[in-house]
Amino acid sequence: MLTTLRIKNLALVADLTLELQPGYNAITGETGAGKSILIGALTLILGERADRALIRSGSDTCSVEAVFDVARLHAPLKSFLEDNGLEPCEDHQLVLKRAFTAAGANRQFVNGSPTTLNRLAALGEWLVDIHGPYDHQSLLQPARQLAILDAFGGFEKTRDAFAALVDQHEALAAEKTSLIIDDKTYAQQLDLWRFQANEIAAAQLKADQEPQLDRDYQRANNAARLLQLAQTALSALSEEDQAVISRAGALGRTLQELQRADPAAMPLIEIHEQATASLRELQSELSRYLDKIDLDPARLQELEERLNLIHALKRKYGATLTEVIAFGETASQKLQQLEQRETELARLNQALKKLETELRQTGGELSAQRRKLIPKLSQAVTRHLDQLGFKQSQFDIALNAAGAAAAVQPPFARTGFDTVEFQFAPNPGEPARPLRAIASSGEMARVMLAIKTVLAAVDQVPVLVFDEVDANIGGETAVAVGEKMRQIGTQRQVLCVTHLAPVAAVAAAHYVVSKQVKGERTVSEIRRLAPAERVTELARMLGGQSEVARKHAQALLKSRNATPRPGSPIKAIS
């Protein structure tokens, strides 16, 4: 449910925070007070296009923030947030924010994480349905209508099973397509994969061998220089007349004489002995190093050719040896698959044939279930429309099947062989038209209200917003509209902008929007009414503050806790 809506600098709203309640929330106020601003704010938070002309005069930035309690949301919200790199919800609170500036900057956030308008809109499809003169009406989409029909009949398992079969079929079909090529292309592909697989296999690569090869090559390439430097160092250490070790011996003899003259110089003798030992160890290591230096042009050429081969393979097959090796494994698999093409094609054809039989059987069952359910759903919605003022109207659902299940050919839609179209005939003698073709927003909203009343137990969108549902109605129809709102409110959170007292009176929470002049500026405000204040507001809606109007308002409020009139229960028809 929507728990909090905060609006800053939108039209006449300076800074408004609205705390909403579960169940049915009514919003009333004088014409022009700003009730539509609340609906506009919701459409913004649900990803609709921002009109910068709505930014409050004198302000540079406008923002809307909404907090939803998603503890009972059925949509896969957690995985959606994870997959899109968005912060998870804390305490089941989903926080959406939208901000835009007069200069054109547009920012949106989910739980504090920056996101795109498309992702915001995707979340909005799960959270809110707005019914009225707005575009955010999921019930007008044929795909959504089909999903509602299936949910109403409890067909989700059959539909999901069909979709899983379609996914398997598409995967196998793609695999088959890769094998169905002409002989010339087949030969070319075969030669290519064989060459690539053999070239990489012949190189006998190891993922970690390149660094050692580089070191060996550098040593072999610099062997002559290394030999010269090592020999010079060894000569200076032990072979020249003034060699370091020879001079160290002379130094030792001098220190011996010093020690004989002064026994306290003994530590100097010990240090000299340690230094001399290190020099002799250096002499030994230099000799061994010289023995390892190999002036072998053949070895150098071998290493150079090996490195050139590795670099060539990396240029063709991958940036690293690991990638080259992986490419070779893939090439081998492709080669094996192509070499066994006929066997593979036979296997795939058999698997596809079996899947298509299962698809036609499951799809046929789904179509039959839908066809059987349609009259029940149509009759239930028609009964509610009658109570909403559409006497002798007719609601129907056109099922457009793709044909007999046995004749349906790939590709298959994941939703089955059918499409549906909700249709409505408001007056006797008129043909039913698609719901999306209804021109009157008032008619549209009441039709949506009837459908939502029937579907309240199965539809998964938790927040329903109705605007102009009371256009051009009154009397008993207004009472019926209020009753429908209350019924839906037992299953979903409902926000209804209305100017009919019978519609507002049955709400669990009543808010009034008003315009005030503050500091020579007009601002729109909204507040929740206390019980006594509701009497005053309902009396205003009934025509004034006369004693008769106030008594009527009190009677309406008293009746809101009465037992609902008999009608279609809010539960799925099985």
Image (spheres, rainbow, N blue to C red):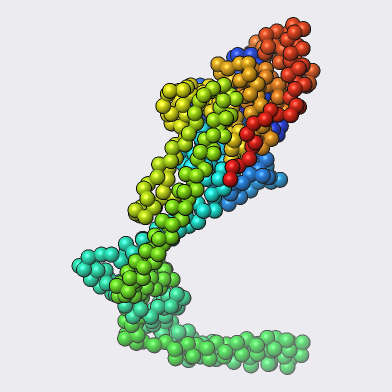
Side of 382 relative to 182 (left or right) = right
Q: Is residue 454 visible?
A: yes
Residue 343: x and y in percent read 32, 74
Between 251 and 141, the one lying in front of the other is: 141
The residue depicted at 74 percent of the width and 15 percent of the height is 553
**On screen, 317 above or below 541?**
below
Side of 475 relative to 556 (left or right) = left
Residue 421: x and y in percent read 44, 36
Image quadrant in which you'd find residue 385? top right
The residue depicted at 53 percent of the width and 28 percent of the height is 447
Side of 565 relative to 204 (left or right) = right
Residue at the top extreme of this rendering: 546
Give the number of callouts.
0
- Image quadrant containing the C terminus: top right
Q: Is residue 524 visible?
A: no
The residue depicted at 61 percent of the width and 37 percent of the height is 456
**On screen, 215 above or below 476?**
below
**On screen, 401 above or below 18?**
below
- Image quadrant containing the N terminus: top right
**On screen, 322 above or below 453?**
below
Residue at the right extreme of this rendering: 532
Image quadrant in which you'd find residue 353? bottom left
Between 539 and 372, the one lying in front of the other is: 372
Residue 559: x and y in percent read 75, 22
The residue depicted at 29 percent of the width and 72 percent of the height is 342
